[in-house]
Image (cartoon, helix red, strand yellow):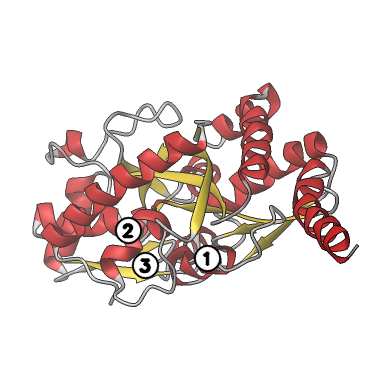
Protein backbone atom coordinates (compact mmCIF):
# COMPACT_ATOMS: atom_id res chain seq x y z
CA UNK A 1 0.00 0.00 0.00
CA UNK A 2 2.80 2.43 0.98
CA UNK A 3 4.60 1.69 -2.30
CA UNK A 4 1.39 2.48 -4.22
CA UNK A 5 0.92 5.81 -2.39
CA UNK A 6 4.54 6.82 -3.01
CA UNK A 7 4.29 5.95 -6.69
CA UNK A 8 1.13 8.01 -7.02
CA UNK A 9 2.74 10.97 -5.25
CA UNK A 10 5.79 10.84 -7.52
CA UNK A 11 3.60 10.63 -10.61
CA UNK A 12 1.58 13.62 -9.45
CA UNK A 13 4.74 15.65 -8.79
CA UNK A 14 6.02 14.89 -12.28
CA UNK A 15 2.67 15.73 -13.85
CA UNK A 16 2.33 19.16 -12.17
CA UNK A 17 4.98 21.00 -14.23
CA UNK A 18 3.65 19.44 -17.43
CA UNK A 19 0.12 20.48 -16.47
CA UNK A 20 1.36 24.02 -15.79
CA UNK A 21 3.01 24.15 -19.19
CA UNK A 22 -0.19 22.95 -20.88
CA UNK A 23 -2.15 25.79 -19.27
CA UNK A 24 0.53 28.42 -19.96
CA UNK A 25 -0.04 31.27 -19.64
CA UNK A 26 -2.60 31.28 -16.82
CA UNK A 27 -1.66 34.71 -15.40
CA UNK A 28 -0.10 38.01 -16.58
CA UNK A 29 3.45 37.95 -17.95
CA UNK A 30 6.06 40.47 -16.83
CA UNK A 31 8.07 41.94 -19.71
CA UNK A 32 11.13 43.72 -18.32
CA UNK A 33 12.55 46.47 -20.53
CA UNK A 34 16.28 46.92 -20.03
CA UNK A 35 16.27 50.71 -20.45
CA UNK A 36 14.34 53.81 -19.36
CA UNK A 37 11.03 54.91 -20.94
CA UNK A 38 11.26 56.85 -24.18
CA UNK A 39 14.11 54.92 -25.78
CA UNK A 40 14.21 52.41 -28.62
CA UNK A 41 13.95 49.31 -26.43
CA UNK A 42 10.93 50.76 -24.63
CA UNK A 43 9.22 51.64 -27.92
CA UNK A 44 9.84 48.17 -29.37
CA UNK A 45 8.75 46.36 -26.22
CA UNK A 46 5.47 48.22 -25.90
CA UNK A 47 4.58 47.77 -29.57
CA UNK A 48 5.20 44.01 -29.43
CA UNK A 49 3.61 43.62 -25.98
CA UNK A 50 0.27 44.91 -27.22
CA UNK A 51 0.01 42.27 -29.94
CA UNK A 52 1.52 39.55 -27.74
CA UNK A 53 -1.06 40.11 -25.02
CA UNK A 54 -3.83 39.72 -27.57
CA UNK A 55 -2.55 36.42 -28.96
CA UNK A 56 -1.63 34.89 -25.59
CA UNK A 57 -4.89 35.98 -23.98
CA UNK A 58 -3.06 37.42 -20.97
CA UNK A 59 -1.95 40.89 -19.94
CA UNK A 60 1.69 41.71 -20.65
CA UNK A 61 2.89 43.93 -17.83
CA UNK A 62 5.72 46.15 -19.09
CA UNK A 63 8.25 47.27 -16.49
CA UNK A 64 11.33 49.42 -17.14
CA UNK A 65 14.39 48.46 -15.06
CA UNK A 66 17.01 50.90 -16.26
CA UNK A 67 20.65 51.16 -15.29
CA UNK A 68 24.15 49.84 -15.98
CA UNK A 69 23.61 49.79 -19.73
CA UNK A 70 20.81 47.24 -19.51
CA UNK A 71 22.69 44.89 -17.21
CA UNK A 72 20.39 45.45 -14.20
CA UNK A 73 17.30 44.26 -16.07
CA UNK A 74 19.13 41.38 -17.73
CA UNK A 75 20.47 40.22 -14.37
CA UNK A 76 16.99 40.50 -12.82
CA UNK A 77 15.48 38.23 -15.47
CA UNK A 78 18.44 35.83 -15.37
CA UNK A 79 17.68 35.29 -11.67
CA UNK A 80 13.87 35.12 -12.02
CA UNK A 81 11.85 31.91 -11.71
CA UNK A 82 12.16 29.93 -14.98
CA UNK A 83 8.41 29.58 -15.45
CA UNK A 84 7.78 31.83 -18.45
CA UNK A 85 6.14 34.60 -16.45
CA UNK A 86 9.19 36.88 -16.45
CA UNK A 87 10.90 37.70 -19.75
CA UNK A 88 13.08 40.56 -20.93
CA UNK A 89 13.62 42.66 -24.00
CA UNK A 90 17.32 43.44 -23.85
CA UNK A 91 20.02 44.33 -26.32
CA UNK A 92 23.41 43.66 -27.83
CA UNK A 93 25.17 45.39 -24.92
CA UNK A 94 24.10 43.20 -21.97
CA UNK A 95 24.16 40.02 -24.05
CA UNK A 96 27.43 40.33 -25.96
CA UNK A 97 29.46 43.41 -24.93
CA UNK A 98 29.23 43.70 -21.14
CA UNK A 99 31.12 40.44 -20.41
CA UNK A 100 34.19 41.90 -22.15
CA UNK A 101 34.02 45.20 -20.24
CA UNK A 102 32.89 44.27 -16.72
CA UNK A 103 35.05 41.86 -14.74
CA UNK A 104 32.41 40.92 -12.17
CA UNK A 105 29.25 40.88 -14.26
CA UNK A 106 26.57 39.30 -12.01
CA UNK A 107 25.21 37.05 -14.75
CA UNK A 108 26.60 35.00 -17.63
CA UNK A 109 24.63 35.69 -20.84
CA UNK A 110 25.73 32.33 -22.25
CA UNK A 111 24.48 30.34 -19.25
CA UNK A 112 21.88 32.33 -17.35
CA UNK A 113 19.40 33.32 -20.05
CA UNK A 114 17.39 31.35 -22.58
CA UNK A 115 17.25 33.05 -26.00
CA UNK A 116 13.65 33.32 -27.27
CA UNK A 117 13.70 35.47 -30.41
CA UNK A 118 15.52 38.33 -32.06
CA UNK A 119 13.20 41.34 -32.24
CA UNK A 120 14.63 44.13 -34.40
CA UNK A 121 17.88 45.37 -35.89
CA UNK A 122 18.83 48.90 -36.95
CA UNK A 123 21.76 51.32 -37.11
CA UNK A 124 22.24 54.01 -34.49
CA UNK A 125 22.23 57.59 -35.68
CA UNK A 126 24.78 60.22 -34.70
CA UNK A 127 22.89 63.43 -33.98
CA UNK A 128 24.09 66.86 -32.89
CA UNK A 129 22.49 69.83 -31.19
CA UNK A 130 22.07 72.75 -33.65
CA UNK A 131 24.20 74.96 -31.39
CA UNK A 132 27.28 72.96 -32.40
CA UNK A 133 26.98 74.24 -35.95
CA UNK A 134 28.15 70.84 -37.25
CA UNK A 135 26.69 69.90 -40.63
CA UNK A 136 28.70 66.73 -41.16
CA UNK A 137 30.80 64.14 -39.35
CA UNK A 138 33.94 66.01 -40.39
CA UNK A 139 32.58 69.18 -38.76
CA UNK A 140 31.87 67.36 -35.51
CA UNK A 141 35.32 65.79 -35.40
CA UNK A 142 36.94 69.19 -36.00
CA UNK A 143 35.04 70.52 -32.99
CA UNK A 144 36.42 67.63 -30.95
CA UNK A 145 39.96 68.42 -32.05
CA UNK A 146 39.63 72.13 -31.28
CA UNK A 147 38.08 71.56 -27.87
CA UNK A 148 40.36 68.63 -27.02
CA UNK A 149 37.35 66.37 -26.85
CA UNK A 150 33.59 66.47 -27.35
CA UNK A 151 30.99 64.66 -25.28
CA UNK A 152 28.52 62.19 -26.72
CA UNK A 153 25.52 60.71 -24.96
CA UNK A 154 24.36 57.10 -25.17
CA UNK A 155 21.81 54.77 -23.60
CA UNK A 156 24.44 53.42 -21.22
CA UNK A 157 27.79 51.75 -20.67
CA UNK A 158 28.43 48.84 -23.03
CA UNK A 159 25.57 49.60 -25.41
CA UNK A 160 26.11 50.06 -29.12
CA UNK A 161 25.86 53.84 -28.71
CA UNK A 162 28.82 53.72 -26.34
CA UNK A 163 30.70 51.30 -28.58
CA UNK A 164 29.87 53.32 -31.71
CA UNK A 165 31.50 56.38 -30.19
CA UNK A 166 34.48 54.49 -28.84
CA UNK A 167 35.06 52.84 -32.20
CA UNK A 168 34.87 56.20 -33.98
CA UNK A 169 37.28 57.73 -31.47
CA UNK A 170 39.70 54.86 -32.07
CA UNK A 171 39.50 55.15 -35.86
CA UNK A 172 39.54 58.97 -36.04
CA UNK A 173 42.02 59.57 -33.20
CA UNK A 174 39.71 62.36 -31.99
CA UNK A 175 38.95 62.32 -28.24
CA UNK A 176 35.22 61.62 -27.83
CA UNK A 177 34.05 61.65 -24.22
CA UNK A 178 31.32 59.15 -23.34
CA UNK A 179 28.38 60.46 -21.28
CA UNK A 180 26.26 57.42 -20.30
CA UNK A 181 22.57 57.60 -19.40
CA UNK A 182 20.00 55.09 -18.14
CA UNK A 183 18.45 54.83 -21.58
CA UNK A 184 18.04 56.60 -24.88
CA UNK A 185 15.12 58.69 -23.58
CA UNK A 186 17.13 60.51 -20.87
CA UNK A 187 20.07 60.93 -23.26
CA UNK A 188 17.78 62.55 -25.83
CA UNK A 189 16.29 64.92 -23.26
CA UNK A 190 19.75 66.22 -22.37
CA UNK A 191 20.68 66.53 -26.05
CA UNK A 192 17.53 68.54 -26.75
CA UNK A 193 18.32 70.74 -23.77
CA UNK A 194 21.89 71.31 -24.91
CA UNK A 195 23.45 69.61 -21.86
CA UNK A 196 25.29 67.20 -24.17
CA UNK A 197 26.32 68.31 -27.70
CA UNK A 198 26.07 64.99 -29.56
CA UNK A 199 24.54 61.56 -29.13
CA UNK A 200 24.66 58.11 -30.69
CA UNK A 201 20.97 57.28 -30.36
CA UNK A 202 18.48 54.68 -31.52
CA UNK A 203 16.24 55.49 -34.47
CA UNK A 204 12.95 55.50 -32.50
CA UNK A 205 14.39 58.01 -30.04
CA UNK A 206 15.84 60.28 -32.72
CA UNK A 207 13.51 60.31 -35.72
CA UNK A 208 10.69 62.52 -34.35
CA UNK A 209 13.17 65.19 -33.25
CA UNK A 210 15.18 64.98 -36.48
CA UNK A 211 12.00 65.46 -38.52
CA UNK A 212 10.97 68.36 -36.27
CA UNK A 213 14.33 70.05 -36.89
CA UNK A 214 15.27 70.08 -33.20
CA UNK A 215 18.45 68.07 -33.78
CA UNK A 216 20.56 67.27 -36.84
CA UNK A 217 21.46 63.78 -38.08
CA UNK A 218 24.99 63.70 -39.46
CA UNK A 219 25.72 59.96 -39.79
CA UNK A 220 24.30 56.49 -39.33
CA UNK A 221 26.33 53.57 -38.01
CA UNK A 222 25.25 50.66 -40.20
CA UNK A 223 26.96 49.15 -43.26
CA UNK A 224 24.52 50.94 -45.56
CA UNK A 225 22.20 53.93 -45.40
CA UNK A 226 19.00 53.57 -43.42
CA UNK A 227 15.71 53.64 -45.37
CA UNK A 228 14.39 55.86 -42.57
CA UNK A 229 17.13 58.45 -43.28
CA UNK A 230 18.17 57.86 -46.90
CA UNK A 231 19.87 61.27 -47.21
CA UNK A 232 22.11 60.75 -44.18
CA UNK A 233 25.45 59.11 -45.07
CA UNK A 234 27.01 56.35 -42.98
CA UNK A 235 30.12 56.87 -40.91
CA UNK A 236 31.92 54.54 -43.33
CA UNK A 237 30.99 56.79 -46.27
CA UNK A 238 32.48 59.79 -44.52
CA UNK A 239 36.07 58.62 -44.43
CA UNK A 240 36.03 55.54 -42.21
CA UNK A 241 35.65 52.43 -44.40
CA UNK A 242 34.84 49.28 -42.45
CA UNK A 243 33.14 51.17 -39.64
CA UNK A 244 29.95 49.43 -38.45
CA UNK A 245 28.02 49.41 -35.16
CA UNK A 246 24.60 47.88 -35.75
CA UNK A 247 22.14 47.66 -32.87
CA UNK A 248 19.61 44.92 -32.10
CA UNK A 249 17.12 43.94 -29.43
CA UNK A 250 16.12 40.42 -28.40
CA UNK A 251 13.67 38.62 -26.13
CA UNK A 252 15.15 36.31 -23.51
CA UNK A 253 13.85 34.26 -20.58
CA UNK A 254 15.60 32.81 -17.53
CA UNK A 255 17.76 29.76 -18.21
CA UNK A 256 16.02 26.45 -17.48
CA UNK A 257 12.66 27.79 -18.66
CA UNK A 258 10.94 24.64 -19.99
CA UNK A 259 11.40 24.16 -23.73
CA UNK A 260 7.63 24.01 -24.45
CA UNK A 261 7.20 27.44 -22.83
CA UNK A 262 10.17 28.93 -24.74
CA UNK A 263 8.68 27.48 -27.93
CA UNK A 264 5.26 28.98 -27.16
CA UNK A 265 6.77 32.38 -26.44
CA UNK A 266 8.84 32.18 -29.62
CA UNK A 267 5.80 31.23 -31.68
CA UNK A 268 3.71 34.13 -30.37
CA UNK A 269 6.50 36.74 -30.42
CA UNK A 270 7.53 35.90 -33.99
CA UNK A 271 3.87 35.94 -35.02
CA UNK A 272 3.53 39.40 -33.47
CA UNK A 273 6.64 40.65 -35.27
CA UNK A 274 5.30 39.34 -38.60
CA UNK A 275 1.85 40.90 -38.17
CA UNK A 276 1.35 43.83 -40.54
CA UNK A 277 0.33 46.26 -37.82
CA UNK A 278 3.37 45.55 -35.62
CA UNK A 279 5.73 45.36 -38.62
CA UNK A 280 4.56 48.72 -39.95
CA UNK A 281 4.78 50.39 -36.53
CA UNK A 282 8.35 49.21 -36.00
CA UNK A 283 9.43 50.22 -39.51
CA UNK A 284 7.93 53.68 -38.95
CA UNK A 285 10.34 54.02 -36.05
CA UNK A 286 13.32 53.08 -38.25
CA UNK A 287 13.64 49.47 -37.10
CA UNK A 288 13.57 46.26 -39.12
CA UNK A 289 11.65 43.39 -37.47
CA UNK A 290 13.76 40.21 -37.59
CA UNK A 291 11.92 37.30 -35.92
CA UNK A 292 14.11 34.25 -35.30
CA UNK A 293 14.17 30.83 -33.72
CA UNK A 294 15.85 30.42 -30.31
CA UNK A 295 18.67 28.52 -32.04
CA UNK A 296 19.22 31.34 -34.55
CA UNK A 297 19.36 33.90 -31.74
CA UNK A 298 21.82 31.71 -29.83
CA UNK A 299 24.15 31.62 -32.84
CA UNK A 300 23.83 35.39 -33.29
CA UNK A 301 24.72 36.02 -29.64
CA UNK A 302 27.77 33.76 -29.98
CA UNK A 303 28.86 35.51 -33.19
CA UNK A 304 28.36 39.02 -31.81
CA UNK A 305 30.06 38.04 -28.54
CA UNK A 306 33.21 37.24 -30.49
CA UNK A 307 32.98 40.32 -32.75
CA UNK A 308 32.47 42.82 -29.94
CA UNK A 309 35.05 41.12 -27.74
CA UNK A 310 37.65 41.76 -30.41
CA UNK A 311 36.56 45.38 -30.90
CA UNK A 312 36.53 46.10 -27.16
CA UNK A 313 40.02 44.68 -26.78
CA UNK A 314 41.53 46.40 -29.84
CA UNK A 315 39.98 49.77 -29.01
CA UNK A 316 40.89 49.51 -25.34
CA UNK A 317 37.29 50.22 -24.29
CA UNK A 318 36.48 49.90 -20.59
CA UNK A 319 33.37 50.37 -18.48
CA UNK A 320 34.93 53.31 -16.65
Whether residue 130 appears in this view of the structure is no
- Element at label 3: loop
Residue in the picture at 22% in, 56% down: 309
Determine the CA span between mark 1 and mark 2. Answer: 21 Å
Provide the secondary structure element on which disc 1 rests: helix
Q: Quadrant of residue 83?
A: bottom right
Q: Nearer the viewer, mark 1 or mark 2?
A: 2
Residue 180 x/y as whole percent: 39, 69
Name the residue at 11% across, 52% down. 171
Q: CA distance from mark 2 to mark 3?
A: 10 Å
Residue 116 picture quarter: top right
| Residue at screen point 48% across, 61% down | 112
Which label belongs to residue 97?
2
Secondary structure type for disc 2: helix
Left or right? Give the position of 98 relative to 16.
Answer: left
Q: Picture coordinates of residue 233 (x, y %)? A: 27, 33
The mark closer to the camera, 3 or 1, is 3
In the depicted structure, whether residue 165 falls above or below residue 280: below
Q: Residues within 10 Å of mark 1 (few under 14, many from 20)?
A: many
Q: Which residue was labeled with disc 3?
A: 157
For the residue pair 85 and 156, the one nearer the viewer reads as 85
Query: On residue 186, which mark appears?
Result: 1
Q: Residues within 10 Å of mark 2 (few under 14, many from 20)?
A: many
Amino acid sequence: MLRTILAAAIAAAIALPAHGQANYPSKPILLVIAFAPGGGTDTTGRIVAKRLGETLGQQIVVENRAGAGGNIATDFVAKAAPDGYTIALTSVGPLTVAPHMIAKLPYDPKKDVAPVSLAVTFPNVLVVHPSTGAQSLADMLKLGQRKEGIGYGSSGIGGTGHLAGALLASMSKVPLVHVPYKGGGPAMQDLLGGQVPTCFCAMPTSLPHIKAGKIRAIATTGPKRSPALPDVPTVAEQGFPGYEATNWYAFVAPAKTPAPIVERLNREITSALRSKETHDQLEAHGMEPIPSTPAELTKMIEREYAVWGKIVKEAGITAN
